[in-house]
Amino acid sequence: MKLDQYIRSQELTYAQFANMIHHDPKTVYRYAHGERMPQPHIMTKIYVVTNGLVRPDDFHELPNLF
C-alpha cells in the first residue's frame, strides 16, 4: 500500500502521521507523493507504525509485467 493511501484510509493528516514517526510533516507529504525517498531508518518507522501495510518496496514504481 502506498503511504498516501494509508494516510487517507486512516483519516490522518500528514502532520498526525509525521508526529507518529517523529518526522517533519512537509517531508512526509513529499514521501507520500513520491517527491522524496525515505532513508532506511525512516522506512523502518513507517513499516512499524503502519503494521507492515506500507512496505519499503511500496516507495518504488515497478513495471507491471503481467
Image: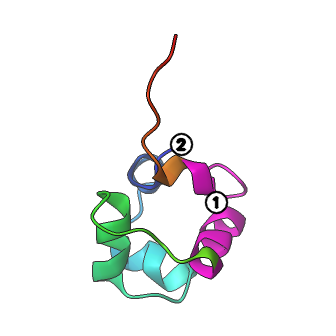
Q: Position of residue 56 (x, y in %)?
A: 61, 57
| Amino acid type, residue under disc 1 in the picture | Thr
**8 in magenta:** no
The stretch in magenta equals: 41-57
Q: Is residue 41 above or below residue 54?
A: below
Instruction: Determine the secondary structure under disc 2.
Output: loop
Say which residue label 1 marks. 50
- Label pair 1/2, CB-CB below 8 angstroms: yes
Residue 28 at x, y = what percent?
A: 38, 73
Q: Within 10 angstroms of label 2, few (less than 14), some, or many (20 or more) residues?
A: some
Could you tell me if residue 13 is visible in this image? no
Q: Is residue 32 left or right of residue 49?
A: left
Q: Nearer the viewer, mark 1 or mark 2?
A: 2
Neighbourhood count class around disc 1 (C-alpha, 10 Å): few under 14, some 14–19, many 20 upward? some
Dot 1: element: loop
Depth check: give the residue in front, 11 or 50.
Answer: 50
Question: Residue at the spot x=42%, y=42% of the render?
Answer: 61
Q: Nearer the viewer, residue 13 or 65?
A: 65
Q: 59 or 15, which is in the foreground?
A: 59
For residue 57, above or below residue 25 = above
Q: CA distance from mark 1 to mark 2?
A: 10 Å
In the rendered image, which residue does mark 2 sit on? 1
**Whether residue 46 can be seen here:** yes
